[in-house]
Structures are given as structure tokens and as C-alpha cells.
Amino acid sequence: MPLGDSITEGGGGYRYPLMEKLLAAGYSVEYVGSRTTQSKPDSPLGVLSHEGYSGSSVGGIANRFEKIYKQNPADIILLHSGHNQFAEKQPIPQMLVATRKIIESARSINPHVTVLLAQVIPSGKLPKYSYIPEFNEALIPLAAELNTKESPVILVNHAEGFDWRTDTGGDHVHPNAAGGKKMAMRWFEALQKILPPPTKKPSGFAHRSEISPLTQIRLWEGPAPDTVENPGPEIQEANGRVSNVSVPMLDVYLPDQKEANGMAIIICSGGGYGRLASGPIGKGAAARFLPEGIAVFSLKYRVRPPSTNVVRDAVADGKRAVQLGCVYELRKMDEKMRFETKIGLLRKTESRFGRLKKPTFGPKGGFQPLSANS
């Protein structure tokens, strides 16, 4: 769980380069959290969860922490919180109390949680943040006091080697790309010491700049059911998003045959039924799941406009995607493995795909029968 303020929340910070390093090294990990703000749509990782709160002090985070941690009881917490205070108010004693409260609250929910506690990055916004070096020093005895064998508290020094003159943006507070990579490396080095050995061969993720679908499947032969007349062309928007979708498609990403395990996941991008990011989301899911042998199908379903009943149409496309995904998986695998095929549906949205139940196949289920070319 990445936990902290805007330095954690920001998509240009450490979260993305850290995950790239972890996946490239072969670790099977995921971020947990209730928030998905400030994602990087152009990243093949897609949306990454977190608990970063812009403008929050460590006290503010401590006050909300118990509730959010009950919802997402992470095994490891990456806590970087020491900004959003004023030096003239002598905030360090209260900050230490709040830091302690976070760790104790986590332990009350998960007695075996590991906390990586950051000595936070320095800032050039002075004199406001002139207290940071003293705060970082005060964290040393606090971490030593709270550290236990059952629930380690491990200090991670992000201040060392971080120069706000070259490693932050124009505000002299938030890390730029170089600063984000430095933070990612500090976290990575600490995680290597506590994570189980990688269970997969290195993915090579950090060395590929682009992931492309193997093929695309058109969901329906001819126009989709209830398609309006003259819907107009799809509109390509910024950051890989698309709107005015009337021809639903599945982007297919397949793992190496030696790693394929007969499982697949269908990704449904969010966008309030008005636009989709099925391309970037699909690439992110592929980067996450292909190394585990799981096939990925990214669904581009109908939106409004042009749909006049978008829930009906989107759910129909979702059901059809499950059907086609199952058939595609069956056809590409050996006969003896067919019974192992499992399809999961993941929605990155507040849509109503939760209505979907076990799919039925063929005309009885209301679907058009598959053609020989499907």
C-alpha cells in the first residue's frame, strides 16, 4: 500500500517506476488502496491503486487510516508522509505521534504487517519545510522502538542522495521523473530484502516500451444489436481514450504458450459510459497478468453517444465478450486442457457489469451463433 500525501498520489512520482522494477525482477505483487487518482494513461501498467492524499499532513492521514486499512489490509505499507506542515509551528512532536498512530492502527488490524517508514525527501520550499531534516532524524529512534520480529518497521532513507535542485519540479517539493526513479530505487532496495524470492522469471517489462494486442475480435457479425442508425465514427481522444463507440471489440493479449495456464481475464475500462481507455487499460493488464500465464482481453464496449440505452448495450457487450473469450481460449488450447478454461471479468469502472452471471452459449442465450471465422 503506497501511503502518504501528494508525493505518493502523483502519477509522476515513485509508484510507476517502482512497479516496473518489481515486475521486471519477477516479483508477483500488486498495489492496494481505495484511490486511483493521477494515473498515467500512457503507461502499459494502466491504473495503479494507492492511498495518497494531496495536501494531507501525517496527522490527517492518521485520522483516516484505520478505515481505509480495514478495507485494504495490505501486507506491506510504504509510508512516506512528512510534508504539509509549517516549520514555525514546531510540528515534529505531533508528527511523531501521528506516525505512531498509523503503525499501531495497522497492527491492530493486521498483526503481521510490515511498514517501510520513509525518511522523507527534502524540499527547497523554505523556510516552510526546514523542519524536515530534524523530523527524519527523529524517525530513527521511533522506528527502532516500534520494530518487532512479528511486525517489522524498517526505515527507508529517501533523503540521502535526493537533491531538490535536480530531483523536484518547479515547486521544489514534488519529485520530477528523475526524483521519482530515485525514490523507486530506494523502495525497491528495501523490498528486495523482505519479499519472498521472485516466483516468475523476470518479465523484461522495463525493457519494452510498447505492448500490442495479438489480434482484435469484433464482438458481433454486422451491427451490434439495437445499434442506432448512422452512429458516426469513433473519436480518438487524448491519452488513448476513445468515445462514440458503436462497434464493440476485444483486444487479445496472449501469454507465451509455455506459461499459459488456461485462465483469462476480460478488462472493462471505466469512463462513465461516455468514453473508454480500453487501449491503455488493456496494455496495463497485459503487463500485469501475461507473466503469470493469464490471457487478457480488453473490451471496447458501446458508450453514449451513440447508444440510447447504454446500460443495456454495455451489458450485452460484456456478456458477448465472456462468450467469445471462452471460445477463443478453447480453440487455442489443446483438447485435453479445455475443461480447465476459466474466464474472469474485471471492471475498472462504476458500471453495472456486476449484473453478469454465468454466460450461456448459442441462440438459447440470446447470442448470435459464432461463425466459422469468429
Image: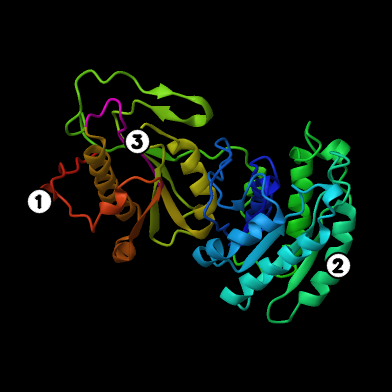
Image quadrant occupied by the N terminus: bottom right
Is 109 situated left or right of 6 in this image? Answer: left
Image quadrant occupied by the C terminus: top left
Do labels 1 and 3 touch, CB within 8 Å?
A: no
Is 174 situated left or right of 286 in this image? Answer: right
Type of amino acid at the residue the image marks with label 1: Lys
How packed mark 1 is, by other alpha carbons closer than 10 Å (few <14, some 14-19, many 20 or more), is few
Type of amino acid at the residue the image marks with label 3: Tyr
How packed mark 2 is, by other alpha carbons closer than 10 Å (few <14, some 14-19, many 20 or more), is some
Tell me which residue sits at (53%, 50%) in the image.
35
Q: Main secondary structure of the magenta part?
A: loop
Rendered view: 307 above or below 37: above
Indicate the secondary structure of the residue bearing disc 1: helix
Percent x, y of residue 364: 9, 51
Magenta residues span: 297-308
On residue 364, the disc is 1
What residue is disc 2 on?
140
Mark 3 and mark 2 lie on one chain; the one further toward the N terminus is 2
Mark 1 and mark 3 lie on one chain; the one further toward the N terminus is 3
Is 299 included in the stretch rendered in magenta? Answer: yes
What residue is disc 3 on?
273
Question: Foreground mark, 2 or 1?
Answer: 2
Question: Foreground mark, 3 or 2?
Answer: 2
